[in-house]
Amino acid sequence: MSSLTQSVEIDAAKDKAWEVLADFGTVSRWAPTITDSAIVGDASEGVGAVRTCDHVKMGTIEETIVSWTEGEAYAYDVTAGLPFPMKALRNHWSVHEQGSRTKVILHQEFSTKLGPLGSLIESMMLKRMMRKEMGLALAGLKYHTETGLLATTEVDLPLESVS
């Protein structure tokens, strides 16, 4: 299993950043590579909530929340639609007060099929692709939280703010 961690500081209070992040069904408002998203079922937050996302490269994926700490963090697994050779993908999102600003951390864990060959693919290609995707999501979250505007692939996102 591989892991990556990136973060961004948002010019907004922690509660505001959490409000945007925790609105699980509306990720398409701030994740520029997600063109549409919707809650599946009755639960819109908390463990067990499920959403579908239309990703510009991966098609439709399904994500299920596996942990939730109100106002602080959540994690979800991609439970359907992972492209080959991906075997598993979990994203952990957390918000941290930094005075009047908020630091959002995205920690991602993923694994591939194919044993040693999959590990080679991870190290040569997937980590770079996943890091780019994470950066876009964090920059989009920052942009949307600070401006209220939709973050799309056509918007000049603050990618330099992601570390």
Image (spheres, rainbow, N blue to C red):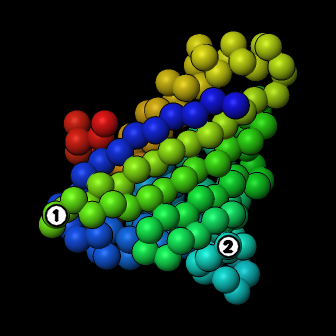
User: Up-down: is 29 above or below 15?
Assistant: above
Q: Position of residue 95 (x, y in %)?
A: 38, 61
Q: Is residue 26 above or below residue 163?
A: below
Question: Measured from the top left, where is residue 85 in percent x and y?
Answer: 76, 29
Residue at image position (67%, 73%) is 47
User: Residue drawn at (60%, 17%), measured in percent from left and top?
Assistant: 123
- Foreground residue among 155 and 67: 67
Indicate which disc, 1 or 2, sits on the residue closer to the N terminus: 2
Q: Is residue 76 above or below residue 72?
A: above
Residue marked by disc 2: 47
The label on residue 17 is none
Nearer the observer: mark 1 or 2; the answer is: 1
163 or 24: nearer the viewer: 163
Q: Quadrant of the N terminus?
A: top right
- On the rendered structure, is 34 left or right of 7? right
**Residue 91 position in % (x across, y down):** 58, 50
Task: Tell which of 151 and 122 is nearer to you.
Answer: 122
**Which amino acid, mark 2?**
Val
The reply to whether residue 8 is in sight is yes
Residue at label 1? 99
The image quadrant that residue 49 belongs to is bottom right
Residue at the far right: name it.
114
Q: Residue 115, position in %: x, y?
A: 83, 19
SS assignment at label 2:
loop
The reply to whether residue 52 is in sight is no
